[in-house]
Image (cartoon, rainbow, N blue to C red):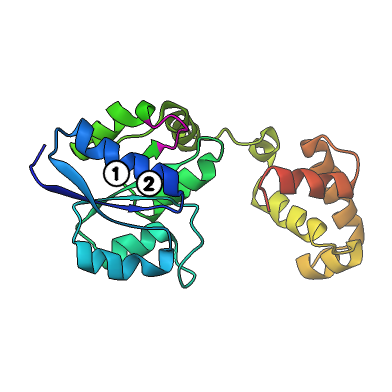
Amino acid sequence: MQNGIRVVVVDGHASFVRALEGLIPEVSGGRATVVATTGEAAKVGSVMRAAMPDLVLVDPALPPGGGRHPVTLVRESAPQTRIVALADESDPALAVEALHAGAAGVLRRSADVAELRQPLLAALEGWAVVPPALLTTLLDQARPQQPHPAASHLDDDDRRLLKLIAGGSSTSDIAGLLHVSERTVKRLTASLLRKMKVSSRTEAAALAGAAGLL
């Protein structure tokens, strides 16, 4: 760990911030200190310019400043600074959003700040820290999704017909668009319903929407 690590905490929970102000020098052996704090995303830019931090701990749940995500505000104000989000485990979507916005890791907010000792030390040393539960969520999202069974039986013509049906087009409308007779449309529709294993156009449209086929 480098000496003289300057840390800024962007978080609106006053008691949690005070706990971090004491914990950070303790776990780092005095090599890291909190040099500034703010609980308002709108003040992030001015705080970054004044403090010139090496690491910023930021709450992604803060109300946006000027419509900008707090992590984005930090990244734009101090592009070379490492950012670690402080997120509640109850809402992994916030943590994922923070990572997408540019955070290099996530620390789990805890009522017992002592639980942060090891992950906080790792963050100060430059490691990409992610709580196990969030890591599981990220891996699940990254895993390739199996296509819906209905998709494997449909060709391009089937999908085009399905989109027309789901869009509310009548048999005569579809006949005109495809330049075929209404009898042909009925035959093609019956074949499509068999492939999708449904009994009506309404069910086919609902299944298509749920399976992401539209």
Q: Position of residue 136 (x, y in %)?
A: 46, 28
Badge 1 crowding class, 10 Å Cα cut-off, few under 14, some 14 to 19, many 20 or more, is many
- The vertical placement of 108 against 201, above or below, is above
Report the predominant secondary structure element of the magenta stretch: loop
- Taking depth in this image into account, of 79 and 197 the one nearest to the observer is 79
Q: Are the two marked residues, 1 and 2, in contact with CB atoms closer than 8 angstroms?
A: yes
- Taking depth in this image into account, of 50 and 205 the one nearest to the observer is 50
- The vertical placement of 63 against 122, above or below, is below
Q: Which residues are magenta?
A: 108-113
Q: Which mark is residue 21?
A: 1
- The vertical placement of 15 against 115, above or below, is below
* Image quarter of the C terminus: bottom right
Q: Position of residue 203 (x, y in %)?
A: 86, 44
Q: Residue furthest left?
A: 3
Tag 2 secondary structure? helix
Q: Position of residue 195 (x, y in %)?
A: 77, 37
Say whether residue 192 is left or right of residue 48.
Answer: right
Residue hosting label 2: 17
- Give the amino acid at mark 1: Glu
Say whether residue 162 is left or right of residue 172.
Answer: left
- Taking depth in this image into account, of 58 and 24 the one nearest to the observer is 24
- Real-space CA distance between mark 1 and mark 2, rounded to the nearest whole angstrom: 6 Å
Q: Position of residue 92 (x, y in %)?
A: 52, 39
Badge 2 crowding class, 10 Å Cα cut-off, few under 14, some 14 to 19, many 20 or more, is many
Q: Residue at x 39, y 32 (%)?
A: 113
